[in-house]
Amino acid sequence: MFRFELTPNNGGVVLWGDSASLNELYEFIHYVVDESPLIKNKEGFMLALAYDIRKALEGQRRTDEYLYDHSDTYQLYGVELLWPLVLLQAAIIRDSMGYIETDKAKLSVMYSFEFILESALKQLIPDRFGDVIKTAKNASNSDYDWLEDSIDSRCCYFINLSPKDRKEKLDKILCSFDEYWIKFTKDKQDVKMINLIMNTDCEWPENIIW
């Protein structure tokens, strides 16, 4: 069972789950990363998603108790996931599933993960969430080496934005993962953003203001 919570400063989504659900997701991500021919670096940013989930399972991110039926409680484990990164990761996982063997159990895990992300995104930007998901899908088709080289600059740029700009610029930041979009966009604001991204300090902060 998964639940979600939006972070207060529009940095991302808190993915909550019980130990069984998170363990299934952890194992599923490892399977996709190991088997997918699209994911060239098996130790790179795609595996980072599994790492965050494992840390959540170990109680090193966030924990809470969920009250069920007014009396029973069970433990939940949570982890913050950065919007541009997790949307790209989810899109690449979905693309990869077209190239590897999957069964109904694996499909169920993916559908649950996608549903949580889409539900959270719909709450964040109800008028644009569908377009943002499509943008992430388009960006995920870029060359994998290009995507991996682009992760730090885009995510650090996003982290440094105000809460308002994080929400408003999320789709454009995802567009910037598309190497062809960067080459051909003529919009002045887009070009300005790209220049800022290219000159952003790519050092991830120790503590993200979520």
Image (cartoon, rainbow, N blue to C red):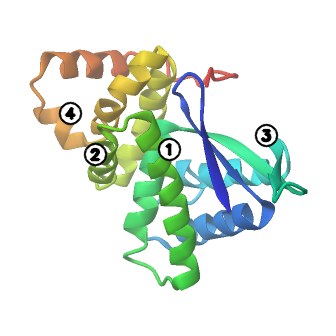
Q: SS at mark 4?
A: helix
Q: Quadrant of residue 208?
A: top right
Q: Where does label 4 land, which residue?
A: 182
One can see residue 43 in this view? yes
| Image coordinates for residue 76, horizontal then vertical, percent | 79, 52
Q: In screen coordinates, is 95 left or right of 12?
A: left
- Residue, x 73% and y 45% (percent of image)? 78
- Residue, x 47% and y 30% (percent of image)? 155
Give the residue type that dot 2 points to.
Thr
Q: Where does label 2 land, which residue?
A: 135
State the residue in front, 65 or 26.
Answer: 65
Q: SS at mark 2?
A: helix
Give the residue type that dot 4 points to.
Ile
Front of the two marks 3 and 2 = 3
| Image coordinates for residue 59, horizontal then vertical, percent | 85, 46
Residues at marks 1 and 2, CA–CA distance in whole angstroms: 16 Å
| Image coordinates for residue 103, horizontal then vertical, percent | 52, 85
Residues at marks 2 and 4, CA–CA distance in whole angstroms: 13 Å
Q: Is residue 24 above or below residue 12?
A: below
Give the residue type that dot 1 points to.
Ala
Position of the N terminus, as image quadrant, is bottom right
Which mark is drawn over residue 62? Answer: 3
Q: SS at mark 3?
A: strand
Q: In screen coordinates, is 196 left or right of 106?
A: left
Residues at marks 3 and 2, CA–CA distance in whole angstroms: 30 Å
Q: In screen coordinates, is 29 left or right of 140?
A: right
Front of the two marks 3 and 4 = 3
Q: Where does label 1 land, which residue?
A: 120
Front of the two marks 3 and 1 = 1
Residues at marks 4 and 1, CA–CA distance in whole angstroms: 28 Å
